[in-house]
Amino acid sequence: MTFSNPHLGVLVEMLETERAPSPEIVAFILRRTPGAVVDVDDVRTVQAAIFWWRGFAGGASFEAYLEAVPSAPARPVGPKYELRLLTLVDPRRGDSVSAALLGQRGKFALADGQLRPFDRRHGIREDRPYWVSADDGSGNLWRPPEDCRQECTGLLHAGILHVGIAIMVQHGRRPHFMDLPGSVLVQDARSSAYVGVWNEEITIGAHDDSVPSGNYGSVKFILEGT
C-alpha cells in the first residue's frame, strides 16, 4: 500500500496522537487501498481499516485482514441498554502487543500473563475479532468497579482489557480512565484493569477497586451477533 504525502501526514498524525479518524479520513485513505470497499457507512470496513493502520493485522494485507472480520450487526441490541459505542474488538495480538499498538510505552508497560478474566463469563475467546456495544464508563464515575460486576448479569458484561483497548482505538481518547472490572490481576480477584491517559501518555494497568474515584468509570458491554 502506498500513500501520497498529504494523506500519509494525516495518518501519521492520527497514529501519533491516538485520535480516532473521521469518516472522511477513512474514505480518503481507503480510496488508495487496492481492493478496499470505499463506503464510509460500512462500519465493518471503517473499523477494520483503523485496526489495520495501527498494526493489529501483524503485516497481513488489508484485504486479508478484512476477510477475518465478521459482519457488523444490522440491528445492535446495545442501544436498548444505553450502550451506544458499536465497537470491533480484535484480541488476537495478545495483551502486551495490543497495549503497545494502542500506544503504551515505558517501564510500566503491560506484560502478558498479568491479567485474567474475573470469571468464566468474561473469558471471551481471543482467537478471532468480534463486535460489542459498549459505553465508556462515563456514567459510572464515583462508583467502584465491584458495583459494575454485580450489575452485569444476563447479556451485560463488565469491561475487559481488549474491549477497553478497542474503545480507545476506534473512538479516541476519553477524558477519564476506563475501569475494566472483567479483567483482574492474576493474584487479586478484587482488582480491576483500567486504560486511560496520564500526562498525555496511554496508561494501562490494574488497581484496587474498593475506592471510588471521579477519574475512573467502569465500562459495560454486550456481545453483538453471538
Image: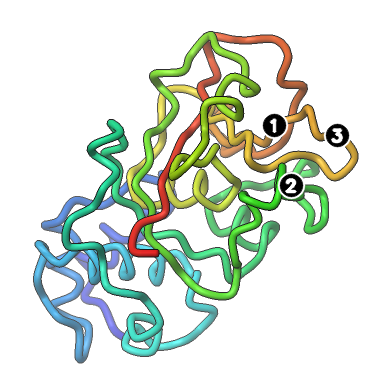
Dot 2 amino acid type: Ala
Instruction: Single out the residue that lies furthest toward the right.
Output: 187
Please tell me which residue is depicted at 48% across the width and 77% down the height of the picture.
57
Question: How far separated are the C-alphas under marks 3 and 2?
Answer: 19 Å
Q: Position of residue 126 (x, y in %)?
A: 60, 67
Image disc number at residue 188 = 3
Work out whether residue 130 or residue 165 is closer to the camera in this orientation and state it.
Answer: 130
Q: Residues within 10 Å of mark 2 (few under 14, many from 20)?
A: some
Which residue is under mark 2? 109
Work out whether residue 4 or residue 196 is closer to the camera in this orientation and state it.
Answer: 196
Please tell me which residue is depicted at 73% across the width and 14% down the height of the picture.
210
Q: Position of residue 222 (x, y in %)?
A: 41, 46
Mark 3 and mark 2 lie on one chain; the one further toward the N terminus is 2
Image disc number at residue 192 = 1
Q: Position of residue 28 (x, y in %)?
A: 13, 67
Mark 2 and mark 1 lie on one chain; the one further toward the N terminus is 2
- Dot 3 falls on a residue whose secondary structure is loop
Q: Which of the 4 image quarters holds residue 184?
A: top right
